[in-house]
Image (tube, rainbow, N blue to C red):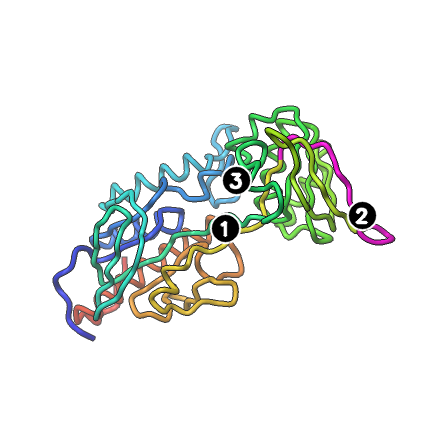
C-alpha cells in the first residue's frame, strides 16, 4: 500500500442516522479526524420513531416511557460532537477515488479528502406509484404518522404496509382515531411477531390481508380510495370513504454513490460487505440501511457503524505502515 500523509480528514462519513452517528462517535474516539456529511438533520429515520422501546437499555425510568427517536438521535449527535466529530450540513453529490484517497464533492461546493469513507446514507421511502399518490401528497397522503397523524384525529385512516413501520405507525394512529384500516398485500405481516400481535389485538384497527391499494381519489383532498382484495371467487374491488392514507411500503437503499465508484451491490441494490463492513472497494465501508443485511433495526445500524469505524481505523493504520492490531 502507498504511504499517505496529506489529506483533509482521516474518515468521512456520509449520513448521520444511527449508523453514521455511531461511526462518528467511534471514529472520533479513536482520535481520527472525522467529518460527517448530512443533508437533513442528524437522526435519519429514527427521528420518526415516537417511542424507541426495542433499543437495549432504552427503558423509561420511574415508570416513564423510553426515549423517543428524536431524543435518542439528539443524544447520539451530542455524544459524537463531544468526542470531536465535525458535522457539515450538506449532502454528498459525488465520490471519486484516486490512489488511496477518496474525494467527496458536497452539495455546498466543497471537496473533501480522506483515505477511508463510510456510507451510511440510509434509505428513502418506497412509493406505490399509483394514481392519486403524488397528487394528494400533503393533502391526505403521508409517509409519516408522527408528522401528520394529529391532523386526522377521529378521521377514517387507511394504512398501507405489513412491516415493522406499518404496524408501529398504525398503532400510533389508533390513539388518534378509532377508524383505522391496515391493508397488506400478503396473507400475513412480515413485521416482528410482537408488533403484529399488538396490531391484530387493537380494537381500533381493522386488518385486511391479501389487499392492495389501487387508487387514491378526491378533489382538493383525499376523500376515497379504491382497493382490491382477494375473495373466494376472485379479486373484488371496493371504493371506500377515506380521509387520510399513510403509506409504509418499505424502503429503497440510497446506494447510487456506492455504485458510482464500483462497489458491488446485491440484486436489491444494497452494498455487499464482509463482517468488517468493508465493501469491494478498499477503504470504502457501508453501515446501516444501505448494507445488505437480514435484519434492519436501529440497534443493528448502530452496531454496523461502530464496526465500520473500528475497521476503517485499522485500514488507515495499514496505509500509514502501522501493522499492530488496533484496539479502543
Nearer to the camera, 115 or 54: 115
Choose top left, top right, bottom left or bottom right for residue 83: top left
- Whichever of callouts 3 and 2 sits on the residue coming sooner in the sequence is 3
Image quarter (top left, top right, bottom left or bottom right) of the C terminus:
bottom left
Vertical placement of residue 118 versus 18, above or below: below
> What residue is shown with label 3?
53
Q: Which mark is residue 297?
A: 1
Across and down, in percent, residue 275 comes to 41, 66
- Whichever of callouts 3 and 1 sits on the residue coming sooner in the sequence is 3
Which residue is farthest front?
Answer: 219
Q: Which mark is residue 236?
A: 2
Question: CB atoms at circles 2 and 1 under 8 Å apart?
Answer: no
Residue at (68% x, 30% y) in the render: 156
Q: Nearer the viewer, mark 2 or mark 1?
A: 2
Q: Which residues are magenta?
A: 231-244
Q: Was residue 65 drawn as part of the magenta stretch in this picture?
A: no
SS at mark 2? strand
Question: CB atoms at circles 3 and 1 under 8 Å apart?
Answer: no
Residue at (64% x, 48% y) in the render: 162
Q: Nearer the viewer, mark 3 or mark 2?
A: 2
Amino acid at each position: 500500500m502507498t504511504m499517505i500523509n496529506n489529506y483533509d480528514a482521516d474518515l468521512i462519513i456520509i449520513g448521520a442516522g444511527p449508523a453514521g452517528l455511531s461511526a462518528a462517535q467511534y471514529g472520533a474516539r479513536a482520535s481520527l479526524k472525522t467529518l460527517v456529511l448530512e443533508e437533513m438533520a442528524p437522526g435519519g429515520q429514527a427521528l420518526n420513531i415516537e417511542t424507541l422501546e426495542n433499543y437495549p437499555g432504552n427503558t423509561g425510568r420511574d415508570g416513564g416511557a423510553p426515549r423517543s427517536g428524536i431524543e435518542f438521535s439528539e443524544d447520539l449527535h451530542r455524544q459524537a460532537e463531544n468526542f470531536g466529530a465535525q458535522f457539515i450540513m450538506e449532502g454528498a453529490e459525488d465520490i471519486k477515488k484516486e490512489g488511496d484517497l477518496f474525494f467527496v464533492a458536497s452539495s455546498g461546493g466543497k471537496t473533501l479528502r480522506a483515505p477511508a469513507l463510510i456510507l451510511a446514507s440510509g434509505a428513502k421511502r418506497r412509493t406505490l406509484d399509483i394514481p392519486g399518490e403524488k397528487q394528494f401528497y400533503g393533502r391526505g397522503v403521508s409517509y409519516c404518522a408522527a408528522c401528520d397523524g394529529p391532523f386526522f384525529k377521529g378521521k377514517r385512516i387507511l394504512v398501507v404496509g405489513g412491516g415493522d413501520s406499518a404496524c408501529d405507525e398504525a398503532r400510533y394512529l389508533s390513539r388518534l382515531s378509532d377508524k383505522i384500516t391496515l391493508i397488506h398485500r400478503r396473507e400475513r405481516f412480515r413485521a416482528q411477531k410482537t408488533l403484529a400481535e399488538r396490531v391484530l389485538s387493537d380494537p381500533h384497527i381493522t386488518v385486511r390481508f391479501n389487499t392492495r391499494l389501487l387508487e387514491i381519489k378526491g378533489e382538493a383532498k383525499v376523500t376515497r380510495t379504491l382497493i382490491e382484495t382477494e375473495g373466494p371467487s376472485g379479486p373484488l374491488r371496493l371504493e371506500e370513504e377515506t380521509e387520510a392514507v399513510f403509506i409504509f411500503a418499505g424502503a429503497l437503499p440510497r446506494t447510487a454513490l456506492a455504485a458510482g465508484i464500483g462497489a458491488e451491490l446485491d440484486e436489491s441494490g444494497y452494498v455487499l460487505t464482509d463482517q468488517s463492513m468493508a465493501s469491494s472497494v478498499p477503504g470504502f465501508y457501508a453501515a446501516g440501511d444501505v448494507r445488505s443485511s437480514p435484519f434492519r433495526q436501529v440497534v443493528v445500524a448502530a452496531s454496523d457503524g461502530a464496526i465500520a469505524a473500528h475497521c476503517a481505523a485499522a485500514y488507515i493504520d495499514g496505509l500509514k505502515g502501522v501493522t499492530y492490531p488496533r484496539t479502543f
